[in-house]
Image (cartoon, helix red, strand yellow):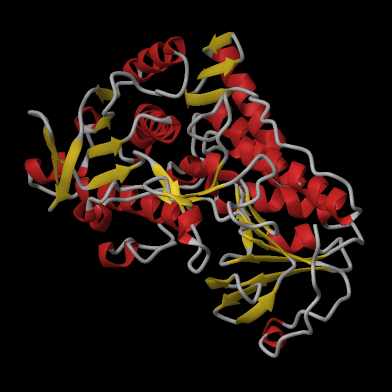
Amino acid sequence: MQFKKDTAKTMEKTLNIPETEKPRVVIVGGGFGGVSIAKELVERKDFQIVLLDRQNYHTFQPLLYQVSTSSLEPESIAYPLRKIVKKGKNTFFRMANVLNINETQKEVETNIGTISYDYLVIATGARTNFFGNQTIQDNAMRMKSVPQALKLRSLMLENLEQAVITPDPELRKELLNFVIVGGGPTGVELAGGLAELRASVLPRDYPDMDFSEMRIHLIESADRILPPMSPKASKNAEKFLKKLGVEIHLNTLVTNYENHLVSTNGDLELKSATFVWSAGVTGSPLPGLNEEAIVPRANRYKVNEFNQVEGFDNVFAIGDIALMKTSDYERGHPMVAQPAIQQGKHLAKNLLASHKGKEMKPFKYFDKGSMATIGRNKAVVDLGKLRFGGFFAWFIWMFIHLIFLVGFRNKIITLFNWVYSYINFDKASRLIITPFKAKEYKDVV
């Protein structure tokens, strides 16, 4: 793969990135994919690495629901991106919003300046998919980032504070109705976390409130929850949730949410002050790059077996934003952490090989399994042909998540919080730090 080194652009000085004779790799996105490739290249002397993200931290998204349900503080699942790149003498991080990709000039235009690239790696991940329903998008809570998780935590706690003082039984019912749309891992884990709060924590915080009035609804449009997992996992998860008192509505499509009224395609109609949308995700492509390379509806870049974006030799996409069709994954790899991590590591090796004049190797995904936790001592795990449920699956879930948390400190803090909660039947973070305001929520990233 050939590259041509341009002279430093004037706007690059805004980013304060020094000139270099080495090929420059610009990585957009500090999620699982971006962090994975950055960690592989950070101590190499072959490239100059520039990591861009609009936040200055990496978020361990699988545990966001624990921030929302007061089990963990956000710093337990967030890790500074600068700590990842600081080991390299020729690696840089800049907190920036990418505004445009100028493919002709090989430039990334951001809100703080423009930087040229020799290799561009797009790892922008995914955002919540509302399937074109603008009303739901304007009114629903979502949980794809730390600010969103904190807003959701604040809203739920504020509704409980309001419910304990209201004399109106109908308003109290509305405040104590929690509706979660989407029966995937996020929805299932959030429902289980809320049910645990209701069972063992909230009654001690609010001894003057009757928590038999608190209802948790999980709505799924398919005929079972956890559709990507095995039927056995779905059956076990449903059994665990029902035992916790979660009301599950299958084959139900939510059509609208406005003025606290949840409407569906059937007879189900609910009044709820807490409405969480976790029904799907869609890619988050960058403006400016050839739109013909984007798969419609999925909003993911079409990539080949080397993660090269269709039509480009020096532009790559990894993780949720990349759609690589294979015989085993005709619709692309699942939009979860493992494909992003594996693609990031593999692309780092391919860039090094290409730089040394060697051939790149095609990516092959190794499926390490799927899992979801439903609460204390309850989880479901699919590992190849093996299926686990209950305590052993819960232990596997905790072990795997601790391993993949970024940062030793985060692992220790998270483990301590889990042990504390397990022993004391308590959640340590029931704090309203940022009071919720509905009109502000749509602007939270």
Residue 412 at least partly seen: yes
Residue that lies at the very extreme toward the bottom in this rendered image = 10
Residue 208 at least partly seen: no
Q: Position of residue 205 (x, y in %)?
A: 36, 40
Who's the residue at 42% across and 32% down the image?
193
Query: The N terminus lies in which quarter of the figure?
Result: bottom right
Q: Is residue 214 left or right of residue 265?
A: right
Please tell me which residue lies in front, 406 or 7: 7
Q: Quadrant of residue 261?
A: top left
Q: Quadrant of residue 82?
A: bottom right
Q: Position of residue 13 (x, y in %)?
A: 72, 87
Who's the residue at 38% across and 40% down the image?
280
Q: Position of residue 24 (x, y in %)?
A: 78, 68
Please tell me which residue lies in front, 85 or 11: 11
Please tell me which residue lies in front, 78 or 333: 333
Q: Position of residue 42 (x, y in %)?
A: 83, 57
Query: The C terminus lies in which quarter of the figure?
Result: bottom left
